[in-house]
Image: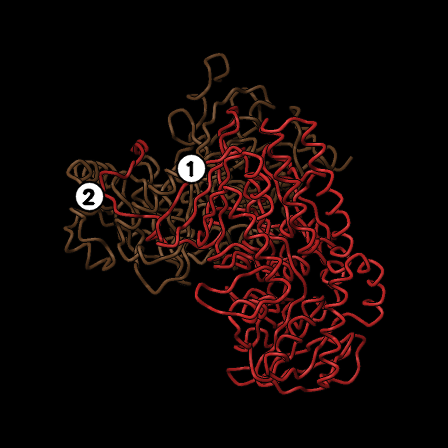
Amino acid sequence: MTAPYDVAVIGAGVMGCSTALHLARAGMKVVLLDRGEICREASGVNAGTLTMQMTRAALIPYALRAHAMWMRMGEWCDGGHVQAVDCPGLSVAFTEHEVAMLEERAHFRRQAGAPIEIVSTARAREIEPGLSDKALLAGHCPIDGFTSAYLTGRAFRPALLNAGVDLRERCAVRGVQPGFSIDTEEGEIRATRLVLAGGVWLQDMAAWLGITLPIKVLINQLVVTERLPPVMRTVLGVASGLLSLKQYANGTVLIGGGWQGIGDRQRGGLAVKPDSFLGNVRLAAHTIPALRDARVVRSWLGLEAETADALPAIGPIPGVADAWIIGSVHSGYTSGPYMGKLLAQAICGQAPELPLFPIDRLLAKDQAA
Amino acid sequence: MAAATEAAQRGASVVVFDESPAPGGQVYRAPPAGYAMPADPDRLEGDALRAALAASGAVVKTGHRVWGVGGGPLVPLGEDAAPFRIDALAPDGSNSVTEARALVLATGTHERIIPFPGWTLPGVLGLAAATILLKANGVLPGRRVVVAGAGPLLYAVAAKVAKAGATVAAVVDLAATSEWLAALPALMARPDLLTRGAAWRASLTLKGVPILPAHRIVAAEGDKVLRRVRVAPLGGGEERVIDCDALTIGHGLVPATEATRAFRAAHRYEATAGGWVPVLDEDRRTSIARLYACGDGSGVRGAAAAPASGRLAALAALRDLGLIDSTTHATARSAPAANFARAARAGGAMARMMALRPALVAAIPPDTIICRCEGVTRAQIEAAVTDGATAMNQVKQFTRCGMGPCQGRMCGEAAAELVAAKVGGREKAGFATGRVPLRPVAMDALLGDFDYADIPVPRPAPI
């Protein structure tokens, strides 16, 4: 029997990686387990959007700090980076109803600290010459940007190893006994503390500990074009939040926004829905008319987790000493690295810089501590 | 063509989609409309298949590029399988949507080209690409052509290039003479092919074309366009330089499994069938109900075996749909089953010769581009594996290899082989997930005319 780890983190997405990295740097002996490969689920296939204008108001303070972390990732991640691009973001309204929505949402986000100003279409088209003249109004946020999310695993991996994290990919966990004894395909792993960081699979993981935590699964669709000459230079969204659009340095344009495809926890992201596919690309081309000349090369799907109140599950697991949970963060990739840092602070016994999101509120009364 | 003909003749309502202006696929490719080309044996056979299809009652949608597949098993958890859905771009650029209770895939192959320095120079093209130029368009790939690679296409292309008046500077054959001799017994089942093959070789010998067995192209060279190739014996030895303005090269054929992968059908790796192939029963059923695969797209067995496998697939579909009873099915399938077995023996021997040769991949220099869409070199792919990538989907994320317009059709084989050599085999290296669109699709065709109000924007997330 090997000496127990100080902490076992289950789930090597952006939440698990950041938590593990910060714990290891705080001196803990960490094992990071994943049934697949590092950042191969939502953390590696999402749109990489670092926008404030799709982030829930309550998460803006976290997202702003995470934005700064992404932009300086090489500095704190041993050179690992995700080609983060710092650029302005625009959220556009095309109807009077959307104008009202935009103004209301900008107001709440501004109160939460996002420097969003409402600008005229003329001003918006100075900021983004590619924008359609059909826009009525836009929210402009100078703090925005995007990453190449597919690089996330590669970016984290060397830093994790340098920090001494025992990274075990393709090592599925079958169950956990208090204490903790973790039953894996490679045998038993023992750890003093446990962190569940399993994205949409958090519901199954919580069940190992006898906790019923309903997690809704969103099947988010993404579509990417061939390389194009420059057609845009900002991150573009719409008032409803159902569009995220950006052009990468290589010329490809990524079209997302959370349109739903077919899939589930068991089978993953299976297929796009024809109506969602069409709706999403129409909305994109309505916003950036030059996209009409593009060709689509691929679509795919990523699974996003959501709690009952669509706010994160980050904190101690009630009734199970030394067990923690992190996930279900709306726009979770955006805030991910900072959330992991916060949880690591709490696990190390420090007061986190910003409050966590304890899950007691999400549990049936007899389970909450 | 055979599957559709069989199904339609037996009373099924059938629609066929093909990207080309006329049915026929690669081997039986017809010339463009209004374009006169002398008929060869393939043409005559193709014409017979085309005539049968035209008379069968099947609706033939040529010039339709199928970019989307869906339905079938791709439904929310707990729901029954849906009708299959086919999205295709019609010749006028509009999108057409078709639903069907059963789907037969006869998607053919794409060409495997194992990269070498200079393979992206203008003037270098695939062997199969050269056959399209020659067969359908009567166009020569160059004036002084080196024909290189593996398999029977080598001699077919060389003979046609020579016959059409260009100089064949050399035939550079990966196979040793002994490999051809070893394939002879299997080829005896197809004396027609054997005769044609012998005639091709004889015509080349007559013209004094140098034939270099067990040789490979070391590099293609030239300033902006191809000027010469460097050639060397496989076992090592002195290189020679051959001046040319075209190099047609192919290292075999790879089944086009984009659609079966998109449906998440079970696949297995079979090098001698061209690579990853859908798992099939003897009646061409995939692991997905009412989804069938036939022809070289389900495992390379040659053009002669393809119609027989198509008929088997059609009969299985009719049986599964309840359109024929089990007795009719049993009787009807015996002839195509026997034909397939016979033809597949010769086809299998050729497929073995065209199977991927690991030594060729091992010889790729580190700075040679593997993924030409994204400019990813061998060294970059291997560095990704060193950095922890263990399978193709992950190598793709680490390097962008296979993310371009071809979606891995050009680079996939070489890249997977490089990864396989490090992780312990092609099964471990896996393959990239199949996703829509199966081919790049113009946004303009998808979008159509629409009003903003038509876009069903979902309900926003809470603020």
Location of residue B211 in the rendering, given as x and y in whole percent from the top left corner: 75, 80
Question: Which chain is brown in the picture?
Answer: A
Location of residue B205 in the rendering, given as x and y in whole percent from the top left corner: 75, 81
Using the numbered discs, state the Cα–Cα distance from disc 1 to disc 2 in whole angstroms. 24 Å
Whichever of callouts 1 and 2 sits on the residue coming sooner in the sequence is 2
Numbered circle sitting on residue A273: 1
Viewer-side residue, B355 vs B326: B326
Residue A235 lies, with reference to residue A20, above or below; the image says: below
Residue A88, picture quadrant: bottom left
Location of residue A58 in the rendering, given as x and y in whole percent from the top left corner: 32, 34
Q: Is residue B84 visible from the viewing direction of this image? A: yes
Say which colour chain B has. red
Residue A273, picture quadrant: top left
Q: What chain letter is assigned to the residue under label 1?
A: A
Viewer-side residue, B453 vs B339: B339
Task: Say few, some or many: other residues with alpha carbon within 10 Å of mark 1 (under 14 / 14 to 19 / 20 or more).
Answer: some
- Mark 2 sits on what residue? A94
